[in-house]
Amino acid sequence: MADFETSTFEKIPYPGVDNNLFMDAFRAFVQEVDLRLRSLRIQQSLSVAGGGTVTWNGTQLAWTSDFEVDSPVLGFRHYLRYGPNGTQRVANMSEGDYLVAPLAPALVENRIENFSVTSTASNLPAGDWVVGYVKNGQFVSQWIST
């Protein structure tokens, strides 16, 4: 009978270490697939509330209270409080800018975070979420995991 191992999150089976000369590369591949599937499952379970009154004037996104994002894994909550300056509930944005939130998938306690703004959505740290972006002078809200 074949020796099988399983991936960390989604329990994807694959041949054990004694069954394949390229086991390390294959294990890394399966674990990456597993991580991406888990990320998709978490993304589909994201619950966002709050923010109070949210406004966009063409260059500035503003909100009056914390956004509350539930962590679907353990149920703790992210509170997204301020914009990039860390003191005000505003984010100044230009055409092509992205609003980003650091959302760790497996919180062990509630966490307060601030939004950031970047001109590129590539090479963001794992766990960051693109919350929205500016296109044709409009703010487009679209929560996407990196």
Image: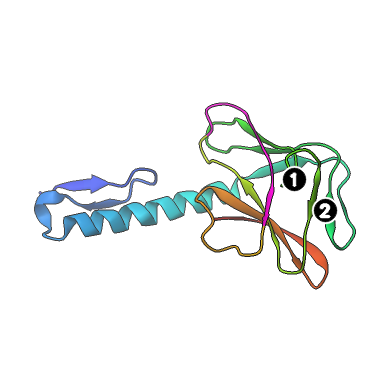
Residue type highlighted by circle 2:
Leu
Q: Circle 1: is it few (<14), some (14-19), or many (20+) Cα within 10 Å?
A: many
In the image, is residue 115 part of the stretch drawn in magenta? yes
Asked if the residue at tag 2 contacts the one at tag 1, i.e. Cβ–Cβ closer than 8 Å, the answer is yes
Residue drawn at point x = 68 percent, y = 41 percent: 114
Hey, which residue is sitting farthest bottom in the picture? 136
Query: Is residue 90 part of the magenta span, yes or no?
Result: no
Circle nearer the N terminus (1, 2): 2
Quadrant hosting residue 87:
top right
The spot of residue 53 in percent (x, y) is 89, 44
Identify the residue under disc 1: 83
- The x, y position of residue 125, in whole percent, is 51, 51
Position of 55 with respect to 15 (left or right) is right
Helix, strand or loop for disc 1: loop
Snapshot colouring: rainbow
Q: Which residues are magenta?
A: 107-117
Q: Which residue is mark 2?
A: 61
> Which image quadrant is residue 119 in?
bottom right
Where is residue 100 drawn, in percent x and y? 65, 52
Mark yes or no: residue 2 visible: no
Residue at 9% x, 51% y: name it: 18
